[in-house]
Structure formats: structure tokens, C-alpha cells
């Protein structure tokens, strides 16, 4: 084989290898560094002394706890529990990036052994509440995850591509590097239970679909050929059946961000998220 032919063969072999290596390296940088460029929120503003006379907005900015969560915490454990929540809000443990679907999709999780003795927990959960986390990321994009609370211990979620929606334990939710508990405004206990019953009857065991709501009707019947679920669409779809459209931008794709910033929900609790963005939304 002459020199020109050798060079040509090497080009056909080496160029694809370099392209693959370049793409893999870029993907690695996106997942490892770009996805954690901002990371989870840690307050940069001053920590103030909280007292029983502190107003709810100040407590929210210092702890991430909404009014209902504060009232429940104080009733159950006294005001010192609010001060403890402030400590946890200002001193989160280090999160670790772990794989969910190989290197394609990963999530940032706190490890109990790294908690430094700071206890994190979901303070006030009611049936029908929506759980949001933005710690799940794919190719550097923090698209997040969502679920609906069924009771104090269980939720329903459409967790991952290739798996049907299912009822699961709430237990690990506060291990996400950030999370929020949302409650529909002015909802009654009867409505909450109706949504829970609907979820159990119609939304468990449904195949995962990234195309949920894109083709056909945005909210097709469960027996439609277009019906499928992804995490935030499940939460939107359930409440939509009862007259609540929680998609804040009104598009065909429902994301955790859309639910998080809906004007039809109130913040019960946030952790690892900037409370000022929600205060500004309320003031507007």
C-alpha cells in the first residue's frame, strides 16, 4: 500500500474517533461543570435573628418556609424548629452528582453522611400538593422533576423514560439538592381528595412519554392514542381535570419550571432555591 492510500485510510479511521472524543468531552463538561455552574442556592444575604415577632416574609427569606409550614412547625415543635430550619437553609451539605440514566441524565443528591447534623424534612404536606425539584439534569440542562403527593408517605410520579408512572415513597425527596412544595391556592380538602382519587384510578401505570401534550389535544382522554405522561405533565394533567391550568406559560410542553411559577399555586416550602424570585412574583 502506497503512502497516499495509508494516509487516506488513517483519515477515515482517525477523524470519526476524534469527532466522537470531542463530542464525549463536550458532553462531559456540560454534565459535570455547566450543569453545576449555579448549583443549588445558598443565601448570599445576611442571616438575621428570627423571633416569634418576625413577619412571615422575613421568615420565608431566611428559612424557605411559607406561612402554612411555619404555623404547622411552630404548633408541633415550637419556634426553635423554625430557627433550626434557618440553620439548614443557610448551611446545606455538599451535593453529589449521581447517574440516573448513565451519563445522559444525572441528579444532584445530598448524602446523609455529609449532612453535618443538619436535618432537612418536608414540613407540611397535604394530598394533592405538587413536589418540584430542579436537581435533575440532562446534557447540562436542569429540567428537574415533579410529582403529586397522595398522602403523608406516598406520591405518584412518572419518573424516567422507559418506566410507567407509579406510586412511590416520599422518603427520599428531601435528598434532592433543591426542592419545593406547591399547593393550589384556595383549594378545599374535598378537591384535594378528588385529585388523589383520580390519580390513583387513572394515572398510575401509564407509559412515560416525552411527547405528552404535544400532539392532538393538550389534555387527551386517558384512552387516547396520544395519552402518555412525563413528570410535570402528570401533575398538570391531574389538576387540569378539576379546572386548574397550572401551566404558567400556556405552551404545549409542561415543565417543572412552568408549575413552579404558576400564579395558581402558593409556596409551602422551598430548599436550595432563591426565595426572592417568589417574593418578587407575589409583589408583582
Image: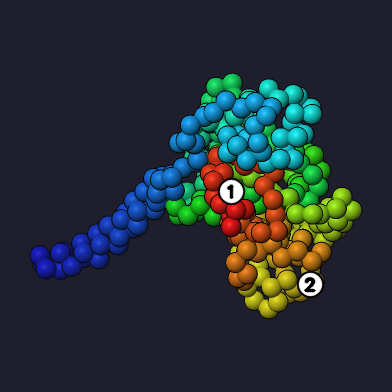
Sort mark 2 into few (<14), some (14-19) or many (20+) by Cα contacts within 10 Å: few
Spatial CA distance of label 2 from label 1 is 37 Å
x and y percent of residue 191 in the render?
Answer: 86, 56
Residue 225 lies left or right of residue 24; in this view the side is right
Left or right? Give the position of 201 relative to 215. right
Q: Where is residue 103 in the image (x, y as percent from the top left)?
A: 47, 48
Q: Nearer the viewer, residue 48 or 100?
A: 48
Q: Is residue 217 above or below residue 144?
A: below
Question: Which of the two discs, 2 and 1, labels the residue nearer the N terminus?
Answer: 2
* Residue under label 1: 279
Q: Can residue 158 be seen in this view?
A: no
Label pair 2/1, CB-CB below 8 angstroms: no
| Quadrant housing the N terminus | bottom left
What residue did someone put label 2 on? Answer: 221
Is 197 situated left or right of 51 in this image?
Answer: right
Residue displayed at 50% across by 41% down: 40
Find numbered disc 2 in the image and state the secondary structure of the residue it sits on.
Answer: loop
Q: Residues within 10 Å of mark 1 (few under 14, many from 20)?
A: some
Amino acid at each position: 500500500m502506497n503512502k497516499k492510500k495509508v494516509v487516506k485510510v488513517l483519515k477515515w479511521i482517525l477523524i470519526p474517533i476524534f469527532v466522537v472524543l470531542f463530542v464525549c468531552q463536550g458532553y462531559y463538561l456540560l454534565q459535570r461543570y455547566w450543569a453545576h455552574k449555579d448549583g443549588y442556592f445558598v443565601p448570599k444575604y445576611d442571616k438575621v435573628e428570627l423571633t416569634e415577632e418576625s413577619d412571615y416574609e422575613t421568615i420565608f427569606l431566611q428559612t424557605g418556609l411559607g406561612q402554612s409550614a411555619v404555623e404547622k412547625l411552630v404548633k408541633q415543635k415550637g419556634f426553635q424548629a423554625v430557627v433550626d430550619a434557618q440553620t439548614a437553609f443557610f448551611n446545606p451539605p455538599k451535593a453529589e452528582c449521581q447517574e440516573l440514566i448513565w451519563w445522559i441524565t444525572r441528579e444532584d443528591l445530598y448524602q446523609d453522611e455529609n449532612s453535618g447534623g443538619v436535618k432537612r424534612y418536608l414540613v407540611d404536606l397535604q394530598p394533592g400538593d405538587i413536589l418540584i425539584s430542579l436537581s435533575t439534569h440532562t446534557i447540562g440542562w436542569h429540567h428537574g422533576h415533579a410529582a403529586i403527593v397522595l398522602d403523608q408517605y406516598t406520591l405518584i410520579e412518572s419518573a424516567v423514560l422507559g418506566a410507567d408512572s407509579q406510586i412511590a415513597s416520599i422518603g427520599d425527596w428531601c435528598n434532592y439538592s433543591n426542592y419545593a412544595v406547591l399547593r393550589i391556592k384556595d383549594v378545599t380538602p374535598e378537591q384535594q381528595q378528588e385529585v388523589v382519587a383520580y390519580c390513583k384510578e387513572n394515572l398510575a401505570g401509564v407509559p412515560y412519554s416525552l411527547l405528552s401534550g404535544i400532539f392532538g389535544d393538550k389534555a387527551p382522554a386517558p384512552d387516547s392514542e396520544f395519552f402518555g405522561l412525563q413528570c410535570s405533565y402528570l401533575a398538570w394533567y391531574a389538576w387540569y381535570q378539576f379546572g386548574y391550568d397550572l401551566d404558567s406559560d400556556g405552551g404545549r410542553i409542561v415543565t417543572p419550571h412552568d408549575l413552579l411559577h404558576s400564579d395558581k399555586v402558593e409556596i409551602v416550602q422551598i430548599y436550595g432555591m432563591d426565595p426572592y424570585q417568589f417574593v418578587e412574583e407575589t409583589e408583582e
